[in-house]
Amino acid sequence: MKALATFLVLLNYFTRCHGWICTTAPEHAAAAQVDAGNGMVVMTDKNSNAFFLSDSSWSKLGSVPLKHVTVGYAGVWGVDLNNNVYKFAAGDFFPTHGLELMQVDAGEGQVVGVTSQNSIHCLKASSASSIEEEGVLNWNTIPGALMYMSCGPLGCWGVNSGQNIFFTKVSPDNCSISGWRQTDGAAVKVEVGTDGRVFVVIQSGHVYERTGISEAVPQGTGWSQITFCVSIKHVTYDLGRLWLLTNTGVILNCI
Ligand SMILES: *[C@@H]1O[C@H](CO)[C@@H](O)[C@H](O)[C@H]1NC(C)=O
């Protein structure tokens, strides 16, 4: 009954106040983070359980407690409370060795991540796809300092501790970059979809999409606000669908 009431309240909210049509994703108490990529949707909850969406419910993903999960062409990756990095293989997450990261993104073949000291690291596609359980991953260091990073087909985006937004192209083959360029605007999170669309969440909980992105202008030209009537904590986008995590822990699926 509570779920139905929540749904009706949200439906009422959302049909009235934005261009995307949103419905609540299958309910899960205390969602902490959500990521969509390569057709999959994964999430963690406040108790560090990881889940994936299948049919109309969240199924447990692996047995390792994780604070952050990501899915993309480079597979499914996660980070635990001690910033140890895990890769999903053969039905569960196994620990990797090499670096401790607070956030990872399984982008375009390569995997990128940032440490708690905000240094930036990249695992080239050939290393990201290998499955040596005991091996030490050979992360490349990328110049710069970021708190959050996400990659798509046209390049990688990041935000730093000053909420500045940056863009660079990154080669999945060898992790070399074209060079960071600061873009206009300020944000706390940035997420790039597998088709290259870029979304940010700003401190007030509003969501913007980057406009004018093309092969010739991969950093885009401006920001366009997407108006939602609730405060958004986290955004992720894949295959035409926007997934939003509200400040109250509800996941919305918008088309
Ligand atoms: C890195 O790979 C790209 C192709 O993805 C290539 O153009 C570039 O020369 C390579 N750079 C280095 C330093 O090997």
Image (cartoon, rainbow, N blue to C red):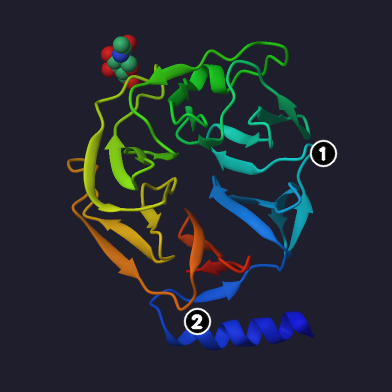
Quadrant where the N terminus lies?
bottom right
Give the residue displayed 65% in from the left and 82% down from the top.
Answer: 7
On the rendered structure, is 17 left or right of 101?
A: left
Residue 245: image x %, image y %? 56, 62
| Numbered badge on residue 14 | 2
On the rendered structure, is 243 left or right of 61?
A: left
Identify the image quadrant of residue 167: top left
Residue situated furthest right in the rendering:
63
For the residues labelled 1 and 2, the Cα–Cα distance comes to: 35 Å
Depth check, front residue: 42 or 147 = 147
- CB of residue at label 2: within 8 Å of ligand 1? no
Residue 227: image x %, image y %? 38, 74
Q: Marks 1 and 2: CB-CB under 8 Å? A: no
Secondary structure of residue under mark 1? loop
| Numbered badge on residue 183 | none
Q: Mark 1 points at which residue?
A: 63
On the rendered structure, is 229 left or right of 184?
A: right
Give the residue displayed 76% in from the left and 83% down from the top.
Answer: 2
Residue 130: image x %, image y %? 61, 18
Q: Residues within 10 Å of mark 1 (few under 14, many from 20)?
A: few
Q: How crowded is mark 2: few (under 14 residues within 10 Å), some or many (20 or more)?
A: many
Q: What residue type is labelled 2?
A: Phe
Identify the image quadrant of residue 94: top right
Q: Is residue 45 above or below residue 119?
A: below
Q: Is residue 39 above or below residue 247?
A: above
Give the residue displayed 42% in from the left and 18% down from the top.
Answer: 141
Give the residue displayed 76% in from the left and 44% down from the top.
Answer: 61
Quadrant field for ligand 1: top left
Q: What residue type is labelled 1?
A: Ser
Residue 249: image x %, image y %? 63, 65
